[in-house]
Amino acid sequence: MTDLIIQILNSMNFVLVLIMVAMGLMIIFGLMNVINMAHGEFFLLGAYTVVMTNRLGLGFWPALVLAPLVVGLIGMLIEYLCIRHLYQRPLDTILATWGVSLAIKQLIIIFFGPAGLTVAPPLPAMVSVAGVEYPAYRLFIMAISLAIIAFTFYVFLRTDFGLGARAVIANRNMAATLGINTRRMYRTTFTFGAALAGLAGAVMAPIMSCDPQMGLGFFIPAFLSILVGGTGTLYGVLVGGTIVGGGDSLFSYHYSPVVAQVVIFSLAIILIRIRPQGLLGGKNHE
Amino acid sequence: MLKISDLHASYGGSLILQGIDLSIKQGGITAIMGRNGMGKTTLMKTIVGLLSPKSGRIELADESIGGLKPHKIAAKGIGYVPQGREIFSDFTVFENLKLATLRYPRKQRHIPDRIFEYFPILGKRKNQRAGSFSGGEQQMLAMARALVTNPKLLLLDEPSEGIQPSIVQEIARILLDINAKTGITIVVVEQNVDMVFDLADTCAFLEKGRIVETCPVDDLREDESMITRYMAV
């Protein structure tokens, strides 16, 4: 029973962070038709921002603000230098962002080495949840992820910026002829998506081993979440993230991570075969 | 108002516009007619910047706008009602209209009251999903949305397509009313001869990517042979 509660809490933990990563990936894809293969590396950069602030003696907490800023800025730079020139060639953006992903990983190896690094837990205390002792820091992760997810929903569903962004997703040409600067919207969105992944990386750094491959562990399930949930609405990410993330952690716990991967991939393949647009549907146009 | 000279543009790899020369005078209502595939929609899309001209000039109020990005052209004062209306069907009426104000600074983003005077039905159904509207109501929403951008020139691409005749007449009446009250210049691509007679003062015929004839609509009323020549399949 105790094990089960801990397992459920851990799953929620993974699911919420995964949704944060997947939301960034999805809004970038939804707006720009760009599949950002470097999204896992934005997560990675967020985690290494924590490694840096630790080394500089600043501890963990400043990284919570610095990581989204730094990674958002890097995202903006990548959009400006690379992706901006490829909007007419969606397939080439896959190759280009994959290249960016490799370059970031190699830079991390050059500066930090290939080995896993650990970060001191910022909140070492345990708290009692439903009768079990659970790390306070993991509860903090859930709280901040929930807040960020809610914030993102607010931005996209309630603000003028979100209205414009949803219009560009639904019909970019029409939005442009109404006076919306789609290019500027792409840059803002790419920056925002990168910042989300950066923040996710930062909050996960203390409970993971920080190594150059760590982004993959979130990029692949994030990608699957979008395929499963569909790209039509942000709610798709909630559904997809919960199924993929929850399934992954439950199967990992009961069997092994390998079995979990096989099951999740197989389910995703079957679902995409039956419902190519994802559970909640795809984009309305194009 | 709008002056197009020797405009060439291609769509889907083939050269559709092959030297368009067209001059639209301030405050008038011009209809562009022609058979399908002659380049009417390509011409509209090139004017609003969705397609780039291969060569030639497009001037709005003596300022060259050819090749500018669509949002820049919208800001110069061209409102566009595309073929098939392209309203945002998942959005409410209010959201559809609000979109057209987003290019302004935050404080100036309001929908003018006169829009709801022209189209009272939109005022009554502000919070209704646009996708639940009939074709005619969607057409009115698309027109209202283009007017919210506060254009000097309004382009409409086949506004009567797929709409019942009584609503087509109403749309023509509303456009005439707006033109009379504001002096806005209107260019309408149209195959519906009745609507052209109701609405336009000048008619230009497009054939094989060129404007082959321009004449007052009154002349067409007396002699319909031109319509047969350029419109009959």
Image (spheres, helix red, strand yellow):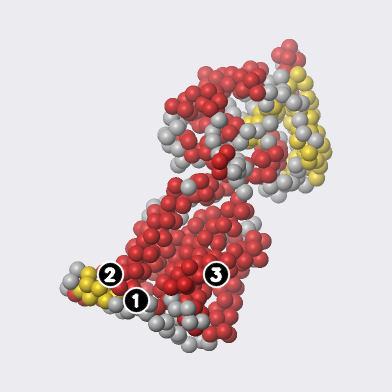
Percent across and percent down for residue B185 are 69, 27
Quarter where residue B111 is shown: top right
| Amino acid at the residue labelled 1 | Leu
| Amino acid at the residue labelled 2 | Leu
Provide the secondary structure element on which disc 1 rests: loop
Identify the residue at image location x=58%, y=80%.
Answer: A107
The mark lying in front, picked from 2 and 3, is: 3
Q: Which mark is residue A9?
A: 2
- Crowding near the residue tagged with mark 3, few <14, some 14–19, many ≥20 C-alpha atoms within 10 Å: many
Vertical order, A120 against A232 (above or below): below
Quarter where residue A4 is shown: bottom left
Asked if marks 2 and 3 touch (Cβ < 8 Å), the reply is no
Gap between marks 1 and 3, in whole Å?
Answer: 23 Å
- Crowding near the residue tagged with mark 1, few <14, some 14–19, many ≥20 C-alpha atoms within 10 Å: few
Q: Along the line of sight, which residue is nearer the eye, A202 or A253?
A: A202
Looking at the rendered structure, the number of numbered marks drawn on it comes to: 3
Asked whether, in this view, residue B143 is left or right of residue A221, the answer is right
Which residue is the site of mark 1? A123
Percent across and percent down for residue B90 are 45, 42
In the rendered image, residues at marks 2 and 3 fall on the same chain? yes
Provide the secondary structure element on which disc 3 rests: helix
Identify the residue at image location x=34%, y=64%.
Answer: A143
